[in-house]
């Protein structure tokens, strides 16, 4: 028998979120998105997954929060996590509720969406992965794993010893349906690899590569930036990644282009490219 629960968490002035619970018992996993107004693609992915899981048998417990921050309010995450005696607000209470949901050895995957990035997994550069976290990361069929500090709720929870990894997908507040389908398939394969669901189709596994160097390339003057490489390109030191007012910008790094800006008017010190190695 499939157990499906929908829970509405209201915090004071109706700042809350919907939780969809499938199955019961151990193991447990939480899938969440919608932490910022840029996570429209992640919200769409998890809403689609809720519909799919209604027709599948679930082993253990799957909890889904499509939109954790419905009002797009700014999270003061560090203050809420570290200064609980001084901070008391509905948003801090919301974070407390998230901590309760991921407690008791429950794993979690956060989905954030960023325009012009290639899909990748983010893990903390400060904490080594234990066996549970290694298994969780390896179950996700995305080949790029990056050690860097991401400003997101899931990353900060991971910094505070919760078993959370973050998937960064394409899209944003506006997105293509292909981006939704891609992440949706990734999550189905992940849940299958972890044993939460069984499907007739064979789930994907992939060889992953971990990148520990996260290099920003910024505009040194104000002008029109035009890219000359694509996200996902493998480049070498000295390669031209674009121009600002027809002046070439060359990279000082070997690696993979994780992000490249679309053509735009660029301000001084504005990031136009990220290279990982």
Image (cartoon, helix red, strand yellow):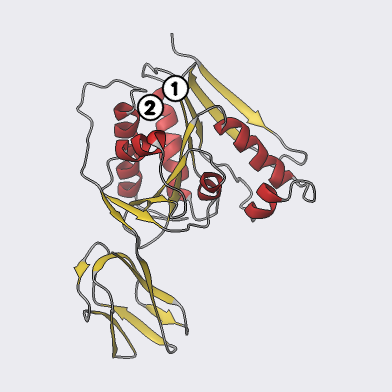
Is the residue marked by circle 2 packed among few (<14), some (14-19), or many (20+) residues within 10 Å?
few
Which is closer to the viewer, label 1 or label 2? 1
Whether 113 is drawn above or below 58: the answer is below
Image quadrant in which the C terminus is located: bottom left
x and y percentages locating residue 198 in the rendered image: 29, 20
x and y percentages locating residue 35 in the rendered image: 55, 48
Left or right: residue 6 versus residue 15 is left
Left or right: residue 155 versus residue 45 is right
x and y percentages locating residue 1 in the rendered image: 43, 8
Farthest top residue?
1
Return the residue at label 2.
52
Left or right: residue 59 versus residue 252 is right
Secondary structure beneath dot 2 equals helix
Residue 242 image-quadrant placement = bottom left
Give whichever of 264, 107 is nearer the camera. 107
Whether 192 is drawn above or below 233: the answer is above
Left or right: residue 88 versus residue 247 is right
Whether 77 is drawn above or below 223: the answer is above
Residue appearing at x 61%, y 45% in the figure: 70
Give whichever of 228, 161 is nearer the camera. 161
Is the residue marked by circle 1 packed among few (<14), some (14-19), or many (20+) residues within 10 Å?
some
Total labels: the figure holds 2
x and y percentages locating residue 37 in the rendered image: 54, 54
Q: Is residue 57 visible?
A: yes
Q: Is residue 170 visible?
A: no
Secondary structure beneath dot 1 equals loop
Return the residue at label 1.
27
Residue appearing at x 31%, y 80% in the figure: 226
Determine the CA span between mark 1 and mark 2.
20 Å
């Amino acid at each position: 028998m499939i157990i499906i629960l929908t829970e509405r968490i209201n915090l004071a002035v109706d700042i809350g979120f919907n939780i969809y619970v499938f199955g019961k018992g151990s193991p447990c996993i939480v899938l969440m998105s919608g932490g910022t107004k840029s996570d429209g693609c992640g919200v769409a992915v998890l809403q689609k997954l809720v519909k799919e899981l209604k027709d599948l048998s679930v082993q253990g417990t799957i909890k889904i929060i499509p939109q954790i921050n419905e009002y797009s309010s700014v999270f003061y995450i560090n203050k809420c996590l570290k200064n609980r005696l001084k901070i008391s607000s509905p948003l801090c209470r919301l974070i407390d509720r998230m901590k309760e949901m991921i407690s008791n050895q429950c794993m979690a995957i956060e989905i954030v969406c960023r325009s012009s990035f290639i899909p990748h997994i983010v893990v903390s550069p400060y904490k080594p992965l234990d066996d549970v976290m290694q298994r969780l990361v390896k179950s996700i069929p995305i080949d790029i794993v990056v050690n860097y500090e991401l400003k997101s709720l899931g990353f900060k929870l991971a910094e505070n010893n919760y078993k959370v990894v973050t998937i960064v997908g394409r899209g944003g507040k506006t997105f293509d349906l292909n981006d939704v389908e891609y992440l949706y398939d990734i999550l189905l394969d992940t849940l299958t690899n972890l044993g939460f669901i069984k499907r007739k189709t064979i789930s994907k596994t992939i060889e992953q590569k971990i990148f520990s160097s996260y290099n920003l390339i910024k505009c040194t003057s104000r002008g029109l930036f035009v890219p000359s490489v694509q996200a996902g390109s493998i480049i070498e030191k000295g390669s031209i990644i674009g121009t600002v007012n027809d002046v070439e910008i060359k990279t000082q790094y070997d690696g993979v282009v994780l992000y490249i800006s679309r053509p735009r008017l660029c301000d001084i010190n504005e990031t136009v490219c990220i290279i990982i190695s």
